[in-house]
Image (tube, coloured by chain):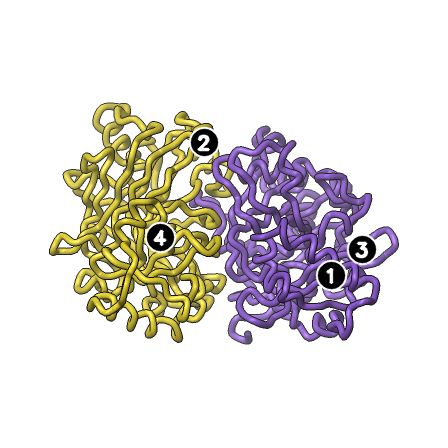
Chain colours: A yellow, B purple
Amino acid sequence: MKLASLKAGGRDGTLLVVSRDLARAVAVPEIAGTLQHALDNWDDCAPRLAECADALNAGLVEDPLDFTAVLDEAAVHAPLPRAYPWVDGSAYVTHVELARRARGAEMPASFWTEPLMYQGGSDSFIGPRDPIVAVDESHGIDFEAELAVIVDDVPMGIAPEQAGTHIKLLMLANDVSLRGLIPAELAKGFGFLHGKPSTAFSPVAVTLDELGAAWDGAKVHLPLLTYLNDAQYGCPDSGQDMTFDFTQLIAHAAATRRLCAGTIVGSGTVANCDPSVGASCLLETRMRETLADGQPSTPFLRFGDRVRIEMVDRAGASIFGAMENTVVALAAA
Amino acid sequence: MKLASLKAGGRDGTLLVVSRDLARAVAVPEIAGTLQHALDNWDDCAPRLAECADALNAGLVEDPLDFTAVLDEAAVHAPLPRAYPWVDGSAYVTHVELARRARGAEMPASFWTEPLMYQGGSDSFIGPRDPIVAVDESHGIDFEAELAVIVDDVPMGIAPEQAGTHIKLLMLANDVSLRGLIPAELAKGFGFLHGKPSTAFSPVAVTLDELGAAWDGAKVHLPLLTYLNDAQYGCPDSGQDMTFDFTQLIAHAAATRRLCAGTIVGSGTVANCDPSVGASCLLETRMRETLADGQPSTPFLRFGDRVRIEMVDRAGASIFGAMENTVVALAAA
């Protein structure tokens, strides 16, 4: 099934069950008013939501919402408009290695065996068609196309082998980054705060069965498509070169504490070793330029630039809907 | 007024209005079922909650709950059992400087002008009488006694001068830290994840008027009392040596993104330059020992150790109630 949140009914929105083809949707107040409520009570809610999805897919729901229209009106929020925790790994170590190489820094060998992961701000996510509001172009505004899972309650100290059953939903993310602020911030040693502002998510979050054979239990084997101002920017396969899969990322996040239902765990920027597939962020392009030419030539995002991120199945149908976010100045927002 | 959350009615608990003397409490479902709901709708809810608090303080509420009893039964959760964001500053720079000095590291001069702040896990807080569950004593389990404010919606890019009006509630925190895991984690550059597990909070969160003259608009001028296994461990004044006050910490957190209602902003470990007032964490004592003797002699917490944190007013009355948390092994939890 596919789930979304309409911008209505409060800060957490109103849960919608969305048809597989993303054309129709229906609110389900009798099952769960919000996605967080459904996640808080997943064992009870999930089967009833699935029944509703089956009926919707079969055309048996009367007067459904036109989901395409509400999405185009920017009336759809992130599936979880706000979440308790949002932790984001760097599962594609090839990307991390490239970053280090471009700035002439050594990468510790442990990066291949233990995930990098940061705790992100989770109180004000960006909807799939909402602007990316930024203070200043000079901050080096960048996108990062990623996959992210939503888990139910995960016990402290779980092993990767047990973590997979806790993955309930999957979605796309744009982990907006302010590259100009990151070096000084990381040098302070306490991780990201200014450099990683609000993150955007895809229109719908989907259960794993919606992926079919593309989901192998821990990774998604499909290209992640990123477009910048309508030109395709990258199409790396998210199942390839993923050093840490989602079960390992969840176990890492839960090493010293339990995770509560609704925790979002991100993959980090999807990146392949093969440069011909393009990139999921501007930084990667700039790093390759630096290695080739001694300096980057691709600029960071400007106000007015639009980033589109999507994933389609083998038949070409959009799985999560497209996220399209335009960069807007705070002064103009 | 003073507000708490009873462990009942769901994951966010049930909002209680608590009497000033912490003896009585009453649920207020007709105003707000949860503290997050009250914060989401503060302008509407706060005056009605204050009216209820007045009636409770005047002894006009029939059949109130015995708050002392429910607290002693560990039936009280953190005021916000889970929160959207929890960001914690290091406002007491003298503490940071000591840490650096003890390990022979330089402290950048910018640490005196720009706060250190990290994004903490906010999905599974520890109640005021609940155990601190830890995987292994060898992780170097430590407490950090702090103050924390809860804000309403804060716009992106706010100035410190405008930030004070967004502070709605104040509480105490124990930012549990795993010292043994922190050096390697910080060396990875992405901040804390394993080293800062769940945080504990005081029984009640209070509005600023409950502090009287001790609240100067940005700081609390009272000692923060920490006890380890019933022996007083520290009593530094939280208004003294606070390099960055709460308005500056909020502005720092909101520099590149808005903060949503219910965001918790912590002060970092309260520390004074004067060593005679003791410390708010074991690390500080160990750092002073290292500087004096070349090595620390105070051990970190062991399973069974109990940490009590409290703040009393000039008349000796507890403002937030006492938080008492015992360290317990995950295997025994």
Protein chain holding label 1: B
Q: Nearer the viewer, mark 4 or mark 2?
A: 2
Give the residue number, with chain letter if any, for mark 2: A330
Of residues A312 and B315, which is closer to you in this image?
A312
Q: Earlier in the sequence, mark 4 or mark 2?
A: 4
Task: Give how far across and how far down residue A263 sits, in percent.
Answer: 42, 59
- Residue B52 image label: 1
Q: Residues within 10 Å of mark 3 (few under 14, many from 20)?
A: some
Q: Amino acid at mark 4?
A: Gly
- For the residue labelled by badge 1, is the local secondary structure a helix, a strand or a loop? helix
For the residues beneath circles 4 and 2, the answer to whether they share a chain is yes
In this figure, which residue is indicated by the disc labeled 3?
A: B312
Marks 1 and 3 share the same chain: yes
- Label 4 SS: strand
Quarter of the view holding residue A277: top left
Real-space Cα distance between discs 2 and 3? 43 Å
